[in-house]
Amino acid sequence: MNLNKLQGYIADYKTFLQRDPRRNSMLYKWESLQHFQENWNLEAADFGAMYDRSLQNSQTRRIWKRENYDAKTMMLKFIQMAPDFVQDMFKDLFFEERDIVGRVDRFVFHCDELLREYKEQNPRSIENNHFHDDGYGMVSWYLSFRYPEEYAPHDFTAFRQLLEMLATREVPQTADFGRFCKVARTLYKMLEKDEEVLDIHQRRLQHELLYQNKSLLVVEDFYLFTTKDRAR
């Protein structure tokens, strides 16, 4: 990883934040993080209702629902079909003493199993995707919302492009979630070194609906800006 290039991209990001500190189109993510932190409870009597409350937003649902993508609806169907099993899936996913790659892979594998069972029980259903096998995208949102200081949302295409821009050796050709987690934490440490960046970032979160504690959501904001918005 070329640190001089990375520092240059961080400088560009700081300039962007100074020019448009609110960046309202992206701040909805911190609102959803706040909802999750306030509502998530693995021991809830009604697991489905708790899951539904945890994934909410007053502006947009695009994290979990967009064109040809509806991860939340399918998970709610799985919960209705097998609530205890899904509860155990999330317990395993969030059990930090176990290897992260094994946890995310098991979670996706169990979603595959549930989808097959759902189709067997609903043969006329047109559902053929659970939307949790999207390069760890939706699974990374669960982790980022549950442990915001440890995980960032994963966008494989953008992450791979960032590694190429940073002249990184051995850029992965397929999603490598373990490596992504390590790089995301390194990126956060680099952002921390420029105190002004995080200070500007923190000021834009001064709203009661937005999560204001430390969160690696800013890492996703940085790498999406660098790979998609910086040249505009």
Image (spheres, helix red, strand yellow):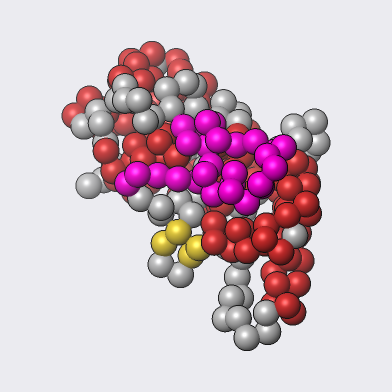
Q: Residue furthest bottom?
A: 124
Q: Is residue 12 magenta?
A: no
In the image, taking residue 7 as reference, residue 148 lies left or right, namely right
Residue at (66, 47) in percent of width and height: 47
Residue 78 in which image quadrant: bottom right
Q: Residue furthest left?
A: 19
Seen in the picture, residue 74 relative to 210 is either above or below; the reply is below
Seen in the picture, residue 163 relative to 110 is either above or below; the reply is above
- The region drawn magenta spans 33-59
Q: Give the image location of residue 138, x and y in percent.
A: 56, 52
Q: Give the image location of residue 174, x and y in percent.
A: 62, 57
Residue at (63, 63) in percent of width and height: 77
Seen in the picture, residue 132 relative to 24 is either above or below; the reply is below
* Nearer-the-camera pick, 196 or 53: 53
Any part of residue 36 in sight: yes
Residue 204 in which image quadrant: top left
Any part of residue 216 in sight: no
